[in-house]
Amino acid sequence: MTTHTDRAADTDAEQIIGEFYSEFPYPWHATRLTAPDDPSHHPALLAQELGDFTHRRLPPDARVWVPGCGVNQALIVALRFPAAQVVGSDVSTDSLDLCRTARDQIGATNLTLREEGISDAPYRQEFDYVVCTGVIHHHPDPGMLLARLAAALKPTGVLELMVYNAYHRREITAFQEAMRLLGREQDLWFARRVAGSLTRDSELTRQLRADLGEPEEQFADSWLNPCERNFTVRTLHETAGTAGLALEAPCASPLATGLDLYDWRVPCDDAQLRGRAARLTEVERWQVTQALSVDRSPLLWFYLRRTDNPWPALRESDRDEAFLDTAFVPVTTSERVWVMGRAGGYRPLDVPQPLVAGPAPVVPWLPDVADGERTVRELLTDRGGVPNRDELRDLRIRLTTPSFPHLRAVSAPSAA
């Protein structure tokens, strides 16, 4: 049972974070913002990433919540979902002010901004899609925040969540602890002085020196955050479970795609190990992948679902098979673009631009022959056959997801 004292502590913790990000607003405004001309584009590609090639999982006119939205996140989401109604929440007044200014410059009328934390948010089964990236790990009780996010989701809703990778944050956690013990945990000048004076060679020293040249907001965000709880796949899975949520699928985020970690395959070419990993549950396999990748990615980025979600709980192999049995056409939508001027403020480009489709397709010829009639299985069979399971998963992700928007389904097996 949550008491008045508990609620006050939750509010205090979020207020501390709000004050920190008001002093060090980060990240800064994006230098380039885009919105697809087709309002169904991003909802359809997100549904495809979850294995729904019928595009029913997320409606274009969805209700969307972006808690802990900061300077950019809510505006980016509102532009990606121009037919949706988007609510952005944050406890940092400065971050909200910066976001509000950019929203008004661009004219994103579908975005509402509210000064509120997750712990006291009133939402119950209201949102089709919740985007919470880089937030719950800055609270002493992330499980409580996850429960609030679960409560805000409709039963059929999708939660996109990013948290810190514990294996990647070891040196940062150690430095934060040292600053707390010295009583200077938010003293940027003192922290940079310490960072430049360390004499013992270590991974910590090397990372600190590499970051000394970064702007102060970026250095503070990495090294001086007043509250941080890091995760492994196992602890995220367990924490989600207590909140009535389940990990559904890895999110092929732009950072993950840049680091080649979007498919969460076990990073090994030993056939026996890969065979053993294939017999694990997906959560167990993701744990093995994280453990063997150690600190390669700073983040764990996943889609989650309520445990009472009526949609079928698909495995990665189910998504792969549905991909094979679907017919696609090339993505042809264009996008409106705004760029940050040298003096600040956004200005639109005069004409819509071709959609930036990300890295080149892993099979360059497939988008050229996708005709909306033949399935992927038929197209691959005509060219030599269906690839192995790992190659097939790579193909699906790098052709049909928001980070790789090359193909859009036009027919697919009926969802259960």
Image (tube, rainbow, N blue to C red):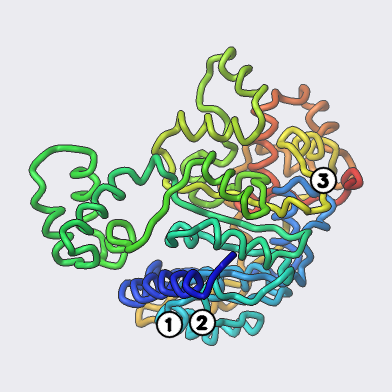
- Label 2: how many residues lie within 10 Å, few (<14), some (14-19) or many (20+)? some
Between residues 328 and 163, which one lies in front from this camera angle? 163
Q: Does residue 250 appear to the left or right of 411 in the view shown?
A: left
| Tag 2 and tag 1, C-beta contact below 8 Å | yes
Residue 273 image label: none
Which residue bears the numbered disc 2? 115
Between residues 383 and 170, which one lies in front from this camera angle? 170
Q: Secondary structure at mark 2?
A: strand
Q: Is residue 292 above or below residue 398?
A: above
Residue 96 x %, y % = 47, 80
Residue at (70%, 64%) from the top-left corner?
Answer: 153
Q: Secondary structure at mark 1?
A: helix
Residue 347 x %, y % = 49, 81
Q: Quadrant of the N terminus?
A: bottom right
Which residue bears the numbered disc 1? 93
Between residues 275 and 362, which one lies in front from this camera angle? 275
- CA gap, disc 1 to disc 3? 40 Å
Q: Is residue 13 above or below residue 111?
A: above
Residue at (61%, 65%) from the top-left corner?
Answer: 148
Which residue bears the numbered disc 3? 312
